[in-house]
Amino acid sequence: MDKVRCFGTGDALYEAYHDEEWGRPVVDDADERALLERICLEGAQSGLSWILVLRKREGYRKAFHGFDPVKVAAMTDDDVEALMQDAGIVRNRRKIVSTIGNAKALLAMHEAGERLADVIAEHTPEPRGHAPLTFADVPSQTAESRALSNELKKRGFRFVGPTTMYATLQAVGAVDDHIQGCWLARAG
């Protein structure tokens, strides 16, 4: 029997993202590149469809050195110009520059003894007692995502508005918004 999904049915890449990643906790490696990737990709999605960015994900990983923050932070204006010609990513100068800036902000956090995972954890809302009935029951932002947005902006991150941060909280499993009827939805 086919699995019932909240979203993504009919597109193998989207189905895999739904089934294997979205809403599942990110086990970040020591340098937090997995969290940096999610924040940067959610920022790249701003104003666009998620499937577009998802289809370009491998292009982003190649263009941005696997989201290694040290390598991304070292990228130059010449790199930005080259990326503006790269059809493997969204060619938006502000979004490209923000990815480089976000890597620099992450490194500054690490130098200050902070971890991105901890900042995200501090802004994770309490779990709901039940799965949302429909996506109309899922907020686009919350008090926690607004506070997370403000905290990251203070640290120099860009393209981290409250809606983007709520999407990030969903993507990294800090929020579980699989809707009722989805094979991954919580019982209740």
Image (cartoon, grey):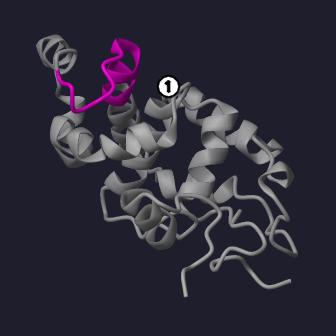
Image point (21%, 40%), residue name = 59
Amino acid type at image mark 1: Arg
Please tell me in which quadrant of the rendered image residue 85 appears: top left
Q: Which residues are magenta?
A: 86-100
Residue 4's x, y, as percent? 62, 74
Q: Nearer the viewer, residue 23 or 127?
A: 23
Image point (36%, 16%), residue name = 92
Q: Quadrant of the N terminus?
A: bottom right
- Dot 1: within a 10 Å radius of its alpha carbon, few (fewer than 14), some, or many (20 or more) residues? many
Which residue is disc 1 drawn over? 158
In the rendered image, the vertical position of residue 129 relative to residue 10, given as above or below: below
In the rendered image, the vertical position of residue 72 relative to residue 21, given as above or below: above
Q: Nearer the viewer, residue 112 or 169?
A: 169
Residue 98's x, y, as percent? 39, 23
Q: Nearer the viewer, residue 75 or 183?
A: 183
Magenta stretch encompasses residue 94: yes
Image point (41%, 67%), residue name = 16
Image point (65%, 63%), residue name = 6
